[in-house]
Amino acid sequence: MCGICGIIGSENQEESALRLRRMMDAMTHRGPDGEGAFVASRAAIGMRRLSIIDLPGGNQPIWNEAETLAIVFNGEIYNYRDLRLLLESRGHVFRTQSDTEVIVHAYETWGEDCVRELRGMFAFAVLEMPGGKTGRPRRVFLARDRLGIKPLYYASHGGNFYFASEVRALLASDCVPRRLSPAAVSSYLLFGAVGEPMTLLESIESLPPGYRGYVSCDSPANSFRPSCYWSITDVPRGQEENVQTESPAARVRTCFEDAVRRHLIADVPVGVFLSSGMDSTAIAAVASRQHPGIKTFTVVFPEQDFSEGQLARRTASQLGTEHAEFVLTGEEMKSRLDEAVAAFDQPSADGVNTFFVSWAARQAGLKVALSGLGSDELFGGYSTFRSTAQITRLIASSRWIPAAIRRAGAAPLNAWAARSRRPDAMRKMTSAFTGPHGFPHPYFFTRTLFSPDAVVELLSKNDDGTDTAPWMNWLSNAAREGETLDAFNAVSWLETRSYLVNMLLRDTDTMSMRHSLEVRVPFLDARLVELVLGLPGAAKQKNGARKALLAEALGNLFSREILEQKKRTFTLPWDSWLRGELRERVAAGLLDCDAKLAAIVDAAAVRNVWRDFLAGRTSWSRPWSLFVLNEWVRRNLGSDAGQSARQETPSATAVF
């Protein structure tokens, strides 16, 4: 695990080394154990390393035998031992025991299709040097894993191409314009996170999950045309029952146990995030059988309604794990608020919870932690699987009512929603009824933070180009890909292509790496994902039970208490804190809108959101999301942001 970066196209090696140094220094938290770089005319690549596998021998860049290919890599390949044996049988010679070296030999063998052989989380760059280290670079191959567990960002400016594991590393190059994107702000307000393949900056894009592409070293600015190598269309479906000798539950059990076993491979201590839910309990149960006494940990709160400590404690005792609890109070949250918010590489309405649970993992002495992310998306753990059906019916009925009448009813319906017991949920229903064509699938209404009408008010009625924005195209493509799926699997697919990748995985990577912690997600193992997505929805929803297939597959790992409890999410007691310890700080932040953000977002509308929260007319997530957005813009795009970065970055002393 590490942070990678590169500059393609510049002939000035000294300048490339200087800018690469700035980018690497901006990611020191991602790799405090070491660094490496290679700089040539027209190509410079670098990395910061968090040592997990082959501690003494895994330093990067790693070259092939002929020294014509070099790789910088962020992630883990869980089938690297299998691939190594295969590649050795084909004559490849390895110098290290690392998974990184497997990729460079795989690329030698299969070219761009090497990504299809990799089972893991990854973002990497392979530099082609046909004439060897002293020759002329030809091109760079960039790739990102299927689900987007690991990030990869890029920008073209001044005839050069830049890439990095973090947006802030690209900003640290001092070559990327710091212009806020109105379309990206719209996406953030709608969903609480900027949608793929955009970032909050006009000049920086994200390589989407399951995509790959080449950058020419001679003409990099316009040469990168990423293409998709994995999608739902690649998942085998409709298999005949008589072909399978095992039930779906048995196959899921076997595949899940194999995924956990592979995710435990490391040369450093590994532990498990343990909550009171099925997902982390399943991982801890399987992991404890393979590694007796494995460490587990839980973040608990004095507010008992939010704390999962008691059940997690009982589960740890039953499994025989070495368990630790870390208490987070409102006062501690207040004292560390700036630290947590500053950790965002991109703003998010969520994420601070992951900041503290990652901190807890490091306090427990861990470098690697396993998380239950991905289970809700695959097995139907979210309420969106039910509410999407409700909104689908509502949209179908709304089409019988003329659009003019629907629009005329928007204001009174929104006023009624504000007075209801569940104002935000009712606003979602209202927006679907009055604007049924606002999104390419009814599911997206269930995930809105602010309704489309509220976003219009917040954006001062500026045209944000939503209909043609890249994030909307991404959602539209995902919806089209899901048209061949049944209702359950369509929601599952849309969850993975939006909420999971845009918020959960992005926040997990950013916040865990801020603490130099690697988080692994066994439920998103490629084979397990394809197995579960390939099963019909009917196999995953039985008798209305939540996560019925998961419970059937792993039921003997759970106590009755875990199986029967109401669905809980790991959420901090924000409502209480925003009305108490954090009230003054958040209110002050919302009253002081950064000039760059104020040019897009109406400051008066922002203040109205805060008043609505205090009056109980909206939930904490809306003012909090605006606070985080403003803080991110102020810290990263404010007038002194670039100068601050330069002052904090040491100068490069050599071309390395």
Image: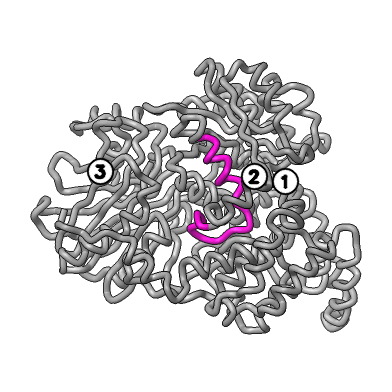
Report the residue marked by disc 1: 382
Display colour scheme:
one colour
Q: Do the residues labelled 3 and 2 touch (CB within 8 Å)?
A: no
Q: What stretch is highlighted in magenta?
A: 342-361
Q: Is 23 on the left or on the right of 470, as rendered? A: left
The answer to whether the residue labelled 2 contacts the one labelled 1, judged by CB atoms less than 8 Å apart, is yes
Sequence order check, earlier mark of 3 and 1: 3
Q: Mark 2 points at which residue?
A: 377
The quarter holding residue 326 reads top right
Secondary element at image label 3: loop
List x then y, in percent, for residue 53: 34, 31
Provide residue 285's location: percent of width, then percent of height.
Answer: 61, 22
Tell me the residue at 58%/68% (across/down): 630
Magenta segment: does it hold 348? yes
Which residue does the numbered mark 3 point to in the structure image?
A: 60
- Residue drawn where x is 61% and y is 38% of the image: 532
| Dot 1 amino acid type | Tyr
- Residue 518 shows in the view: yes
Question: How packed is label 1: few (under 14 Cα within 10 Å), some, or many (20 or more)?
Answer: many
- CA–CA distance in space, label 3 to label 1: 40 Å
Q: In which quarter of the image is residue 172?
A: bottom left
Check if residue 135 falls in the magenta segment: no
Mark 3 or mark 2: which comes first in sequence?
3
Spatial CA distance of label 3 from label 2 is 35 Å
Numbered label tally: 3
| Image: 642 above or below 295 | below
Q: Quadrant of residue 347?
A: bottom right
